[in-house]
């Protein structure tokens, strides 16, 4: 619990700013805890609307300070569908907790909810579900929003909300349950590649790859890992660039989250040292997988198509 208290204090300073520091300090933690910060959390249903890329929806949350002291409230959010929560507005940082509830993540967000006694303010939470739009309405489980303050361990208030998916033709009923995949369905294909020398003598080559994603299991990124490489060959980058690798051999697939049925083609750039002799360098094997923040690796329903092997050849054109 001390860990969360520290996070809440950080969130208060981030959102309220140094200008509010004196006001926060004027009500000492002991006095505020004695008064007992309380809040009303009013929230309706989350309605997810069909879009050209899955479903999206906003959820207004109204918080009223029921206590006798001025407080800054954070919102602890348990998303209703795994991977669905996006943000609480442009000025509301939302670090992710390590907590998971039935595979759903917990966030603590800090919108501008510095409230005097009796004051009411609203925050708007955004959600997105990357699944195929259906011709019928669907319902999902409940999410939870808890108002918290840094100086007390007990919640100040709480609200639960249900989730509905609007059908492609605009209906909200009748509904069927939304069943999200619990395992990913990813696959990879790749082609042989030729490495050539560059100005500093090293060898560079591009391995053409295509990654496909068939299901709607929650994920943040897909990755490609060089699990077996010829002697001296290293994974260097992707083109388009996806940023730094998560390990020496693993890079993120460009473009972040996938829709069901989506595929992306890109080049995986590999490099070999200058002293590598020209000719057949051997076989390289690459594997595709997925990550779900914070640092959960996901199982694949059919791992038989998760790897691809290619031949690498160094050709000196100088």
Image (cartoon, grey):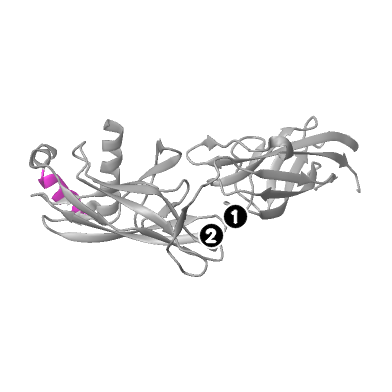
Q: Position of residue 66 (x, y in %)?
A: 12, 52
Which mark sits nearer the N-terminus, 2 or 1?
2
Q: Mark 2 near mark 1, Cβ–Cβ under 8 Å?
A: yes
Q: Position of residue 210 (x, y in %)?
A: 73, 50
Residue at 56% x, 66% y is: 52
Residue at 46% x, 51% y is: 84
Disc marking residue 259: 1
Q: Secondary structure at mark 1?
A: loop
The foreground one among 171 and 251 is 171
Is 310 situated above or below 41?
above
Question: In this view of the protein, can residue 240 be seen by the observer?
Answer: no
Q: Position of residue 201 (x, y in %)?
A: 81, 42
Question: Would residue 227 be counted in the magenta stretch?
Answer: no
Q: Which residues are magenta?
A: 19-27
Q: Quadrant of the N terminus?
A: top left
Residue under label 2, please give it: 54
In three-dimensional space, the C-alpha distance between marks 2 and 1, rounded to whole angstroms, equals 7 Å
Q: Is residue 36 left or right of residue 127?
A: left
Question: In this view of the protein, can residue 265 be seen by the observer?
Answer: yes
Q: Main secondary structure of the magenta part?
A: helix
């Amino acid at each position: 619990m001390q860990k969360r208290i520290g996070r809440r204090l950080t969130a208060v300073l981030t959102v309220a700013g140094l200008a509010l520091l004196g006001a926060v300090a004027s009500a000492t933690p002991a006095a505020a805890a004695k008064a007992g910060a309380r809040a009303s959390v009013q929230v309706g249903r989350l309605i997810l609307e069909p879009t050209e890329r899955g479903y999206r929806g906003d959820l207004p949350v109204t918080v009223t300070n029921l206590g006798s002291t001025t407080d800054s409230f954070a919102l602890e959010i348990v998303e209703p569908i795994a991977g669905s929560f996006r943000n609480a507005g442009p000025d509301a940082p939302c670090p992710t907790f390590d907590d998971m509830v039935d595979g759903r993540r917990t966030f603590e967000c800090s919108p501008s909810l510095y409230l005097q006694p009796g004051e009411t303010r609203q925050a708007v939470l955004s959600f997105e579900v990357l699944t195929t739009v259906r011709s019928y309405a669907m319902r999902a489980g409940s999410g939870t929003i808890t108002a918290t303050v840094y100086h007390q361990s007990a919640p100040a208030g709480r609200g639960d909300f249900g989730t509905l998916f609007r059908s492609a033709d605009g209906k909200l009923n009748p509904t069927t349950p939304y069943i999200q995949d619990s395992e990913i369905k990813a696959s990879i294909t790749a082609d042989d590649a030729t490495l050539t020398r560059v100005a500093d003598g090293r060898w560079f080559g591009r391995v053409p790859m295509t990654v496909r994603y068939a299901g709607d299991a929650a994920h943040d990124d897909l990755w490609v890992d060089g699990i077996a490489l010829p002697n001296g060959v290293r994974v260097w980058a992707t083109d388009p660039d996806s940023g730094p690798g998560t390990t020496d051999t693993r890079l993120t697939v460009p473009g972040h989250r996938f829709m069901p049925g989506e595929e992306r083609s890109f080049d995986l750039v590999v490099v070999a040292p200058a002293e590598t002799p020209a000719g057949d360098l051997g076989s390289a094997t690459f594997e595709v997988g997925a990550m779900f923040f914070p640092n959960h690796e996901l199982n694949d329903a059919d791992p038989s198509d998760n790897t691809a092997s290619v031949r690498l050849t160094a050709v000196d054109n100088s």
